[in-house]
Amino acid sequence: MGKLEGKVACITGGTRSIGRAMADAFVAEGAKVVVNGRDAEKGQRCLEEMGAGDDAAFFAGDASEQSTVEGLIDFTIETYGQLDICCLNSGGVKMTAPVAQMTDEEWTLEVDWNLNHVFWGMRRALQHMIPRESGRILVTSSVEGKLGKPGIPGYAATKHAVNGLMKAAAQEVGTLGITVNSILPGLIETDIVRETGPESAIAMGLDGYDALIDLFTQESAIKRPNRVEEVAAVAVLLASDAGRNITGNMFPVDGGTMPY
Amino acid sequence: MGLLDGQVACVTGGTRGIGRGTAEAFLREGASVVVNGRSEEKGARALEEMGGGDQVHFIAGDVKSRGGCEAIVNGTVEHFGRIDILFANAGGAKDHAPVAELTDASMQDSLEWNFWHTFWTMQTALGHMIPQGSGRIIAMSSVEGKAGKPGIAIYVAAKHAINGLVKSAAQEVGTLGITVNAVCPGAIETDIMKAEGPGAAEAMGLESYEALLDIFAQQSAIKRLNEVTDVAEVCVLLASEAGAGITGSLLSIDGGTSPY
């Protein structure tokens, strides 16, 4: 008997890395899952690799667009009849820069991708969950949701913002059987970090990608990056019945990086 | 296949309440468990009720002395051959009073029961875990380890101190495969709470024990108290392999009470 038997989840940015690990863990615990990603081909590959048959589906679209996020939630409900667990996981940066050099284009992208996406998804999911008086909303924040490194101001600002959004929403629906939490991972070497890390390192005034990884890991107690499985295990706990009394919480998975 | 197969755990104050619930969860996940308490008779009854056979063992002892704490942790190693998980759970406070009227004796008692006990058991456990190159230490803190209510300063101070101890220790052993975390639950109606709650309510200037419970519930988002299993399942996660990347954390299990 899995911990999520009979539950339905959707995950933005679910075909790879953290989102994918959540999807795999949810399916292993008996849930049905819709994963989202921009690339239909990668989505199909993801479904094949997951091997969950009818218990997993893919919804294509860019999570920085409102139509995708709302579409994902509607599609999940249409496909599986309900939505119990909404993971607003997608996020990142493209061409980050220090504040003085930040372009409006990049800033807007980061706000849409990291913050607005979470708001759009949370609002749509809550409209479905409130009448049912049950649900779980999980937001993937970051250690940068409590800290702030130079060169990634948009990321730090938006990850802080989703924590505030999460706290307010948790208070709004606390007595309705719905929990709202964020997970704050330390650096994880995901595909997106590998893709955009070299550019981020330059913006942060570092020597290269390896120096970026080193900076994050040296700030932790464990002196290594975190792992996607570590985040997925926390997501399962928060999504399960055992997580019903944990809400409004910024759950750290950061190897001892954040001071509070 | 349990999440803690082959592991050995030691739970102080493990015959009742949160300690007992967590000991049972550890047992369910395949660990061998030592539970500690002051009373031989209550210990024997706990073992009977838990029904864990040879997988569970009781060590009588008072955690308010270094000798008692060392005997509990070393006794675990003597009985089961090792210690992988320490849950320094025992604690509480009695003879509450506002700071202006506090006696040295009640402050001393609370510090020994909560803080010194955590330090003594942690230090003894680290003596085994550091050479072993692995281990999990979980300290029982409280929502009062992050905030402070009037009238219960002896408890608030001790729980804040535990959180500081946890953070430093986590940094010290972060690369040695050992994690050190604190769990910070909201109010839970355990036997200790029932015993000491009325006195705490009086020191806080409240009308009754029920008024005390109501304050805790009303400060949360869920407007109800937490439950033993909430804490037990977080402890399982921290103790498991998936918890390897979580250390130095003060994990709120408080239904959305703590602001950080």
Image (cartoon, coloured by chain):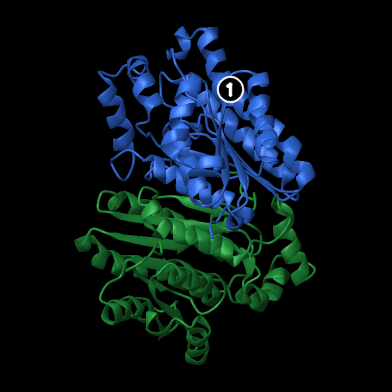
Depth check: give the residue in front, B214 or A106.
B214
Q: Residue furthest bottom?
A: A41
Q: Is residue A98 above or below residue B111?
A: below
Give left or right: position of B73 versus A57: right
Q: Is residue A39 above or below residue A100?
A: below
According to the colouring, which chain is blue? B
Residue at 49% of width from left, 68% of height from top?
A25
Residue at 61% of width from left, 76% of height from top?
A192
Name the residue type under label 1: Val
Depth check: give the residue in front, A218 or A42.
A42
Q: Is residue A136 above or below residue B9?
A: below
According to the colouring, which chain is green? A
Please identify the quadrant where the N terminus of chain A is shown: bottom left
Q: Position of residue B7 (x, y in %)?
A: 62, 48
Q: Residue furthest front?
A: B53
Depth check: give the residue in front, A248 or B138.
B138
Residue designated by label 1: B63
Few, some or many residues within 10 Å of mark 1 (<14, 14–19, 20+) = many
Give left or right: position of A94 versus A19: right
